[in-house]
Amino acid sequence: MTNEWDDYAGGWNVDKTVEEYADKAYSELVKNCDIEGLTVLDFGCGTGSLTQLISPAVKSIIAIDSSPEMIKYLDMKTLDNVTSISEYLSNELIVKRPEFESKFDLIVASSVCSFLPDYEATLSLLKSLLKEGGVFIQWDWLSNDDSSDMGLTEKRVKEAFESNCFVGTKISSPFIMNSSKGNMPVLMAIGKNA
Ligand SMILES: C[S@@+](CC[C@H](N)C(=O)[O-])C[C@H]1O[C@@H](n2cnc3c(N)ncnc32)[C@H](O)[C@@H]1O
């Protein structure tokens, strides 16, 4: 089955900006979380730029992306402790796939959440996959307008974290990246499953 992201996969895999975004996200991740030995879900992993950076330190990664082409490039990286899934994340999938039988210490979502048709519902699904004390972390373009088609506002993210009862929520904009609209801040949100 093809996917709207398939056409971007080849270019995405060699795009220096994608690499830079992943480097910056990774650097913020390890500042905020000791990732050594963790079990990780990389939601919307794309071609695996961030997956590849996280892989050496953690126990295992389930890397899921709905684009088969994106997953094809991730698989070419042959990362020993990474299992890829080329599917949309859904309740049905979680029930069906053995990879979701155990919950995760850490879930990362790099530049994914703002593209979801229902961010709030997906956040609830992701939280259900966290162990007690597990951490969720996302990065997205920071928008100042809820009606914009690019990015998420701090207010929307804050409310979504609150309604999903995350604890210790921290929302910041730790770095700036070049986008189709010029330089834009990136929002990072971190929350724990109590
Ligand atoms: C902007 S790309 C980011 C890819 C990667 N995280 C990165 O930073 O390079 C967004 C990715 O999210 C994936 N995606 C969007 N909605 C998804 C869903 N519901 N389930 C799984 N993957 C999804 C897309 O296929 C696409 O590869």
Image (cartoon, grey):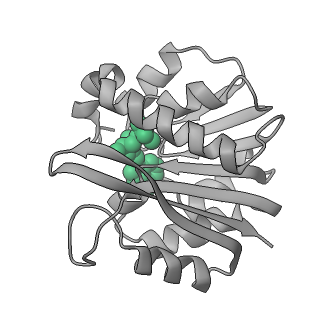
- Classify residue 12 by image quadrant: top left
Viewer-closest of 38 and 66: 38
Q: Quadrant of residue 153?
A: bottom left
Question: Residue at (41%, 52%) from the top-left corner?
Answer: 112
Q: Is residue 137 above or below residue 87?
A: below
138 or 186: nearer the eye?
Answer: 186
Q: Quadrant of the N terminus?
A: top left
Q: Identify the residue at horizontal 73%, vertical 66% (top origin).
A: 192
User: Residue 188 at x, y = what percent?
Assistant: 50, 58
Question: Residue 189 appears at what percent x and percent y?
Answer: 55, 63
Q: Position of residue 104 (x, y in %)?
A: 76, 51
Quarter of the C terminus within the rendering: bottom right
The image shows residue 50, relative to residue 13, as above or below, that is below
Is residue 95 among the parts visible in the rendering?
yes
Q: Residue furthest left?
A: 181
Where's residue 139, x and y in %? Answer: 47, 53
- Residue at (25, 42) in percent of width and height: 178
The residue closer to the viewer here, 95 or 150, is 150
- In the picture, measured across the screen, residue 1 lies left or right of residue 54, that is left
The number of numbered discs placed on residues in the rendered structure image is 0
Return the residue nearer the eye: 101 or 124. 124
Left or right: 85 as drawn, with respect to 34: left
Lateral position of residue 37 relative to residue 18, left or right: right
Note whether residue 97 is visible: no
